[in-house]
Image (cartoon, rainbow, N blue to C red):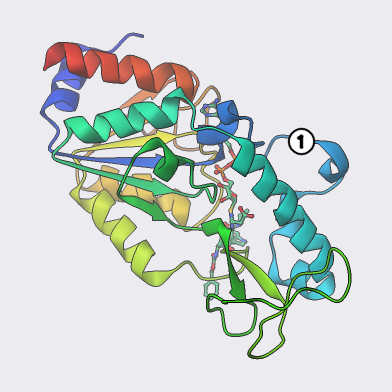
Amino acid sequence: MEIDATVTERLVSARSVAAFTGAGMSAESGVPTFRDAQTGLWQHYDPADLATPEAFQRDPALVWQWYSWRRQLVGAAEPNAGHLALADWASLSESFSVVTQNVDSLHQRAGNDIVLELHGNLHRDVCSHELTPVRDPVPPDVEGAPPRCPQCAAPLRPDVVWFGEMLPQKTWQAALQAAADADVLLSIGTSGLVQPAASIPEVAMQQGALVIEINPEPTPLSDAVALRLAGSAAEVLPALVRRLTERR
Ligand code: BV8
C-alpha cells in the first residue's frame, strides 16, 4: 500500500480522527450492502423500496419480516478486521469518532465507544405512532405481523431512518461537528449516494482535513479526496493501523 511520507506524517500527528462508514464496512462480516443483490427470499426486493414509510404503511408485515431477517443476519455476524482496526485506531488517538450510515451495531461490538448512528439501529424498535421505545409490546394477532404498542396499539417499527425521513437531529449535529473538528477523515465502504450523510466528507475537506477514501470501487468522492486506497475495509484498515503503530 503506497502512502507518501507527508500523508503518513499527517496520520501520525492527527489529534482528531473521524471514520465515516457505509454498508461496505460490514460486507466482510457477511452483511449484504444496499447495492449488492440481496440473497434468499429477499433477492427480488430493492432495499430502497422497503426502507420507506410508504412501504411500511402499505405492508407492515412485509417490512417487519425484512428487518427480522436482517436482524438475525446481523446478530449472527461478527465485527470484521476492519471494524477491529478502527477500535484499535481509537485507542491510539486523542479523539476518534465513528460516523456511520450502518444500523448493525458492529462498530460498538468491535469496541468503538463514540459511534454516531446517522440512520438509527435495527436492533431497537419504536412505536410507529409515537416513535418512542416500547416496553412489553403486545404480540401480533397475525403471524409475521409487527407487535403492537401497549399504549396506542400502533404497530412497532425498527428504530431506523427511512428514505424521506429526517435524520436524528442531535446525532446529525454531532456528526457535522466531528467532521468539522477532524484532522483526518476516513470515508470507508460508502457509495456516497445517500444524502445528507454523503456530505460529511465534504464538510471535513472544506476545513482542511486530510480525507482518505477506502473502497474497492471509485465513487463520486474519489476525485476530490487526498488519497484513495482501492481495497477492502478488512484489508486496508489493519494495514493503516500497523503503519501507525510502527511510527509511534
Ligand atoms: C432525507 C436506514 C429529507 C434504513 C438508510 C435526490 C437527490 C438527493 C437526495 C435525495 C433525492 N431524492 C431523495 C433524496 C433524499 C434521500 C436520498 O439521499 N436518496 C438517494 C438514494 C438519492 N435521503 C433521504 O431520504 C434521507 N432523508 O433526506 O430527509 C427531509 C427533509 C425534510 C423533511 C423530511 C425529510 C434519509 C436517508 C436514510 C435512508 N436510510 N438506512 C435501513 O438500513 O434499512 S440508507 C441506506 O443506504 C443504508 O444506511 C446504507 O448505508 C445506505 C447506502 O449507502 P452506503 O452505505 O454507501 O451503501 P451502498 O450499498 O450504497 O455502497 C456500499 C459501498 O461499499 C460501495 O461503494 C462498495 O463499492 C463498497 N464496498 C463493498 N465491499 C466493500 C466496500 N468497501 C470497503 N470494503 C468492502 N469489503
Near-viewer residue (118 or 226) = 118
The N terminus: image quadrant: top left
Q: Residue at 50% across / 21% down in the picture?
A: 232
Q: Residue at 25% across / 47% down in the picture?
A: 206
Q: Is mark 1 within 8 Å of ligand 1?
A: no
127 shown above or below 84: below
Point out residue 154 in the picture as x, y percentages from the top left corner.
Answer: 71, 84
Point out residue 172 in the picture as x, y percentages from the top left corner.
Answer: 37, 63
Residue at the spot of label 1 = 37
Q: Secondary structure at mark 1?
A: loop
Asked whether the viewer can see residue 182, the reply is yes
Quarter assignment of residue 96: top left
Label count reads 1
148 shown above or below 52: below
Q: Is residue 156 left or right of residue 226?
A: right
Q: Is residue 220 left or right of residue 203?
A: right
Point out residue 210 in the picture as x, y percentages from the top left corner.
Answer: 24, 33
Point out residue 113 in the picture as x, y percentages from the top left corner.
Answer: 30, 47
Label 1, residues with CA under 10 Å away: few <14, some 14-19, many ≥20 = some
Quarter assignment of residue 126: bottom right
Near-viewer residue (28 or 185) = 28
